[in-house]
Image (spheres, helix red, strand yellow):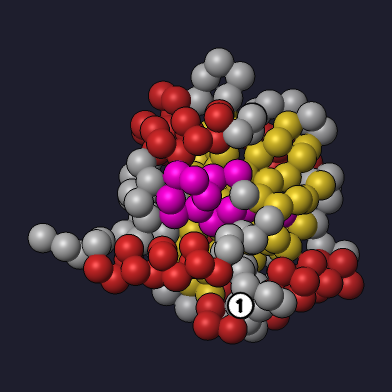
């Protein structure tokens, strides 16, 4: 049984404060078997992540694509997917690159909650630690009603957020087996939300520190 956080950002995302090494270290410390590096429109962290994928811990290559209709996770993708394309076209490109397309944090009001109606996704992110109530409940209900596989991820932008949400999969420890198990609906999801005070603290960091001289 594998336990994985399928939505982690590193400093290769312009709004994250977590290096690839810190993300892996935090995940190992929390007993995870692996993580998916899903930086915003970037695969810059993949080379380092590949080097750290060893000793029973592995990193799934991925990307969070800013489509014209909302954010889409491409799990198992090692190449850039252009941003700004319609959701349907983005999903098609992700599949052509050997990945699976996951609707990221759907139903969050300010992140275009109509995304799930714009394309046929391989899975729905039914729990995101940064999604405020009732977004996760709506996402899970949508996945259940439409018989779509569910995933979960912390959406970590800081080291201490890694592992707040995860999936458990009964499969072999390689990317092909993991993607296949997710698509078959075999992921058992769990997690807890980032507390509101932590949300506010993160906003402060982004506004005042990320762009500091």
From the viewer's perspective, tell me whether residue 15 is left or right of residue 23: left
Apparent side of residue 156 relative to residue 166 in the rendered image (left or right) = left
Q: Nearer the viewer, residue 154 or 29?
A: 29
In the rendered image, residue 50 lying in the magenta stretch gets the answer no
Is 118 above or below relative to 90?
below
Residue sitting farthest toward the top: 55
Q: Residue at 68% across / 56% down in the picture?
A: 192
Label 1 sits on residue = 108
Task: Name which quarter of the figure residue 135 lies in.
Answer: bottom right
Q: Quadrant of the C terminus?
A: bottom left
6 vs 84, left or right, is right
Q: Is residue 21 visible?
A: yes
Does the magenta portion include 157? yes
Please provide percent x and percent y for residue 119.
66, 73
Name the residue rendered at 71%, 52% in the picture: 191
Q: Nearer the viewer, residue 97 or 132?
A: 132
Which residues make up the magenta segment?
151-163
102 sits left or right of 79 in the view: right
Does residue 94 show up?
no
The location of residue 70, given as percent across then percent down, is 53, 75
Residue at position x 71%, y 77% from top?
A: 134
Q: Quadrant of the N terminus?
A: top right
């Amino acid at each position: 049984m594998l336990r994985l956080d399928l939505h982690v950002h590193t400093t290769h995302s312009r709004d994250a404060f977590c290096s690839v090494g810190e993300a892996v270290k935090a995940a190992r410390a929390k007993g995870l078997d692996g993580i998916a590096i899903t930086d915003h429109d970037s695969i810059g962290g993949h080379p380092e992540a590949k080097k750290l994928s060893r000793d029973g811990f592995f990193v799934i290559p991925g990307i969070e694509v800013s489509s014209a209709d909302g954010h889409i996770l491409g799990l198992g993708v090692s190449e850039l997917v252009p941003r700004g394309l319609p959701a349907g076209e983005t999903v098609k490109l992700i599949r052509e690159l050997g990945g699976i397309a996951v609707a990221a944090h759907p139903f969050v009001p300010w992140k275009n909650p109509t995304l799930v109606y714009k394309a046929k996704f391989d899975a729905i992110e039914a729990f995101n630690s940064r999604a405020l109530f009732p977004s996760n409940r709506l996402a899970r209900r949508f996945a259940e009603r439409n018989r779509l596989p569910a995933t979960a991820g912390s959406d970590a932008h800081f080291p201490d957020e890694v592992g707040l949400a995860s999936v458990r999969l009964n499969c072999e420890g390689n990317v092909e087996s993991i993607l296949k198990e997710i698509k078959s609906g075999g992921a058992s999801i769990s997690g807890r939300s980032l507390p509101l005070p932590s949300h506010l603290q993160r906003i402060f960091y982004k506004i005042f520190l990320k762009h500091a001289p």
